Amino acid sequence: MHPILSLAHSVQTSPNVYAVLLGSGISRSAGIPTGWEVTLEMVERVAILSGEDTHGDPAQWYKDRFGKDPGYSELLDMLAKTPAERRAILHEFFEPTDEERDDGIKMPTAAHRAIAELVRDGFIKVLVTTNFDRLMEVALTDCGIVPTVISTADATKGAAPLVHQRCVVVKIHGDYLDDRIKNTEDELASYDPVMDTYLDRILDEFGLIVCGWSGEWDQALRAAFERCKSRRYATFWAARGKLGARAEKLLTLRGGHLIEIDGADKFFAQLQEMVEGLKDSKAAHPLSVSAQVAAVKKFVAAPEYRVRFHDLLVDETSRIRALWESAYTMEARPVDAATIKARFEAYDASTGGLQHMLFAAAHWAEAYNFDSIRQSITKLVPSNLCSGFSVWLEMNKYPGAVCFYAASYGAMAGGNWPLFKHLVEGRLTHSGRDENVLEHLGAITVVSSETANALHPQKRYTPISDHFMRLFGKLSKVEDIQREFERLEVLLALQYLHASQTGNRNTLRGRFVWNHSGQSIQKVQQEIEREGDEWPPLKAGLFGGTKDSSASLIENLFENVKKMANHYW
């Protein structure tokens, strides 16, 4: 599975399991300097005040002048003697001017805001950062979140347990307004033992999403990775291109996954959108499924409710279509078995309520409801192809197919043969082809077997039929869903043959072709022989309306199965 898909799925299904580790790369696009860059700029100022020139190497100048490497805290003491003066110096590095604010400089980036939205929506609660700036806190505040900020070892002592925090930002190198920040190589070699313990808990108890951190200079943070032997949750490291040797070692140690990205902004925005899309696809309608079904049963019971019945179905269909158009585009990448399976699952989740509604409605619907039921199905199928990847274009009929089968199954289960006839004799226009609905939405025709087999760990003869049977076990309380579903497919196959313009076409294949050696066909044949012209489907006008016409179709169906026997056995 592509790492970002796996990450999005894990974040959505396991809220607050992942902590985010942010390095200086996350703030660079906002125009925020690193702590070392601030240190070197202060060295330049000291040199100017001393009347000397660093000749382009301020670190070496400082070492030659003072006999040691430059330190952030010591330089602040040289340049400012009071807290107010220190804040004034640092303010220009980390806080935007009015002009910079207008230009979006030193302001939260798209990455900061996407992370804040993940926190707001309850998916992330722990943010660890090596940065001194306050862009993450600003983005969280803008989302209505007031985080607990831990920037010193002392702050960890009074902090509430992580499990009880709404959001905690751990600034392991300190905050720019506190001159105890860690910046030099010596300072980054170790943390206070209390901070080490706090960080160890995070690395042990949470999965990690790492971005903007190179792993090169922060020796103490690397040591924390190396101390943690737990792998209870995954680590995902987002980086431009390949990692450096030290970061690669840490990723291997954590058994992690590399996600190659174009930039932090695009990565976190995409992650947030994918998590939101997964949440929306699985979100229940404001009416629960049981309430939806109850409303259907009420509205289908009397003609005065037919408008409300129509609106209930069509509104649900419109909601589903709007979701797909925003979250599941035809140009989405990547296109592989994992993403195909994920899209099938999203389609199933989003149509789940409608499937239950159609199944229930089909039991009781009268003639004045028939068109509303059929429209709610056909509205799910785009009439024209747009541009995009062929597999997504192929799959865009699938939601209509699963709802068509749910309604047909409900009509069969309720003995509503007039509705069954209305559904299976309907026509549908898709990609310029106006044909019988079964040509477009039949289980074996709706998508290719190669695409449909993404639903299963092993290849199946009839992958969509097998999948529908599993889904519909939740719609019906029958003990033998296999027997009932195969009966449905036999009836659809007979209609498919009946609708043929020629008498020798292949049938609409289903599980009954290879399962039980044709027993499902025999059971339907026995029903016809026992009841003759009084068989309810015939009385409704299906299959030619007579025992003789249906017997001929049964014979044709048996012949088709024999022709296909070598394919399965």
Image (tube, grey):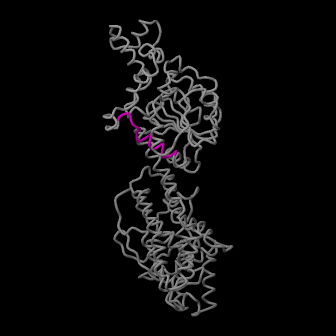
Measured as percent of width and height from the top left, residue 465 is found at: 55, 68
What is the residue that sits farthest to the right in this orientation?
A: 479
The C terminus, quarter of image:
bottom right
State which region is magenta.
105-119
Main secondary structure type of the part rendered in magenta: helix
Q: Is residue 247 above or below residue 58?
A: below
Q: Nearer the viewer, residue 247 or 95?
A: 95
- Residue 317 in the image, given as x and y percentages of width and height: 46, 69
Queried whether the magenta region covers residue 327, the answer comes back as no
Q: Does residue 434 appear to the left or right of 455 in the view shown? A: left
* Residue 107 drawn in magenta: yes
Q: Quadrant of residue 76?
A: top left
Relative to 559, say whether 402 is above or below.
above
Horizontal side, residue 469 vs residue 307: left or right: right
Query: Which residue is depicted at the point 41% across and 6% down?
Result: 65
- 143 is higher (above) or lower (below) than 458: above
Closer-to-camera residue (435/269):
269
- Relative to the observer, which residue lies in front, 509 or 164? 164
Q: Residue 270 in the image: x percent, y percent?
A: 44, 46
Image check: 85 left or right of 229? Answer: left
Marker count (numbered) = 0
Relative image position of residue 300 (x, y in whole percent): 53, 81
